[in-house]
Amino acid sequence: MKKAIELTEQSNSKGIQVQIAKHLDGKKIARAEWVREGRVPLQTLRAKINYCSYTVRTIYRVLGIKIWIFIDEE
C-alpha cells in the first residue's frame, strides 16, 4: 500500500485510496484495511476517479486489492 501511495504522489493526482481485503495477518475472519492520502470524493458524480481491482496470489493466501485515484473535478 505504501508503494502505491508513493508512486501516486509523483503524478499529478489529488488523492488515492488503497484497500486490501481478505484474511489478513493470519486471522480466521475476513476483513479489510485501507489507507487514504489526499482527497478522494467517491460520492461526487463529476469527479474524475480512476478505479482498479486486482487479485494477488501470495504463498500464504489470495488478497483482493482495490485502488481509487482522484485526478480532478470538472
Image (tube, grey):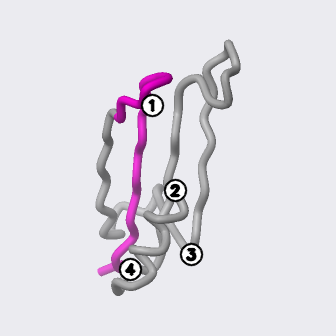
**Residue at 40 percent of width and 74 percent of height:** 8
Q: Helix, strand, or loop for circle 3? A: strand
Q: Helix, strand, or loop for circle 1? A: strand
- Please give the label number shown on residue 13: 4
Write down the quadrant of residue 4 in the picture: bottom left
User: Relative to the observer, which residue lies in front, 32 or 23?
Assistant: 23
Q: Is residue 50 left or right of residue 26?
A: left
* Residue labelled with disc 2: 1
Chief secondary structure of the magenta portion: strand
Q: Residue furthest front?
A: 59
Q: Amino acid at mark 1?
A: Leu
User: Relative to the observer, which residue lies in front, 19 or 55?
Assistant: 55
Q: CA distance from mark 1 to mark 3?
A: 24 Å
**Residue at 53 percent of width and 33 percent of height:** 21
Q: CA distance from mark 2 to mark 4?
A: 16 Å
* Earlier residue among tags 2 and 4: 2
Q: Amino acid at mark 4?
A: Ser
* Residue labelled with disc 3: 38
Dot 2 and dot 4 residues touching (CB under 8 Å) = no
Q: Amino acid at mark 3?
A: Gly
